[in-house]
Image: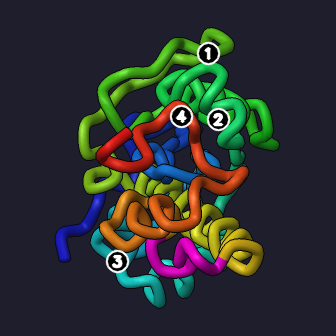
Amino acid sequence: MKLLRCYSEKNEFEAGIDEAGRGCLAGPVTAAAVIMPHSFDLGTVDDSKKLSREQRLDLRPIIEKEAMAYSVVHISHRVIDQINILQATFKAMHQCVDELSVQPDLLLIDGNRFPAYLGIVHKCIVKGDAKYQSIAAASILAKTYRDEYMEELHKKHPQYSWNSNKGYPTIKHRSAIKEFGPSKYHRTSFKLIKEQ
């Protein structure tokens, strides 16, 4: 496995930021911010999409223990429908920065767009979760926390199989929406079924 860079700027506190759930039909979009110490170098940290569920869950407590600061924020489907998914994602990321117990000097954002926040310098890095450990750590937290959220919602609405699809637009999920109709957790601003 290729080792990720531990930091971008050697003498600054950097917060890696990533999100999970942008493309889902139901549930929140979730963002996480993580400031790792410069000494942190755990080779198994990687983009959450490249890791198994078990690997992500094994790494989460290590990240939480070793991080100088971290935060995780859910933005609900209702807000997504009100302001759109892109703005809801930015809102989640901004709130993550607010909730960090350590003020970062630099924000490393996974992706190509981010509205400046609180005057903190930021860098947008395409596929940043495969390049920097702090972003990879944030991707793991965002993914695992959102998965847990959707697994809890699954208990209320098992017909949509959110325990397995986590709200993403699988064929089975769309078929369930067609059969049972949308739940109160679905994003009404999204195209839930192809005939819509």
Classify residue 123 as left or right of residue 77. left
- Which quadrant holds the C terminus? top left
Q: Nearer the viewer, mark 4 or mark 1?
A: 1
Name the kind of residue labelled 1 in the image. Answer: Tyr
Asked whether residue 163 is drawn in magenta, I would say yes
Q: Secondary structure at mark 3?
A: loop
Q: Secondary structure at mark 1?
A: loop
Q: Position of residue 87 (x, y in %)?
A: 55, 22
Label 3 to label 2, Cα distance in Å? 23 Å
- Quarter of the image for residue 75 reads top right
> Nearest the camera: 101 or 81?
81
Instruction: Relative to 172, say whether 14 is above or below.
Output: above
Going 63% across and 48% down the picture, which residue do you hit?
28
Q: Nearer the viewer, mark 4 or mark 3?
A: 3
Label 3 to label 1, Cα distance in Å? 30 Å
Name the kind of residue labelled 2 in the image. Answer: Ala
Of mark 3 and mark 1, the one earlier in the sequence is: 3
Q: Secondary structure at mark 2?
A: helix
> Which label is found at residue 12?
4
Main SS, magenta region, reads helix
| Residue placed under numbered mark 3 in the picture | 51
Residue 70 seen in the current view: no
Name the kind of residue labelled 4 in the image. Answer: Glu
| Residue placed under numbered mark 1 in the picture | 117
Classify residue 59 as left or right of residue 80. left
Q: Position of residue 97 (x, y in %)?
A: 68, 33
Instruction: Relative to 27, say whether 56 is above or below.
Output: below
| Residue placed under numbered mark 2 in the picture | 92
Q: Nearer the viewer, mark 2 or mark 1?
A: 2
Q: Position of residue 185 (x, y in %)?
A: 68, 52
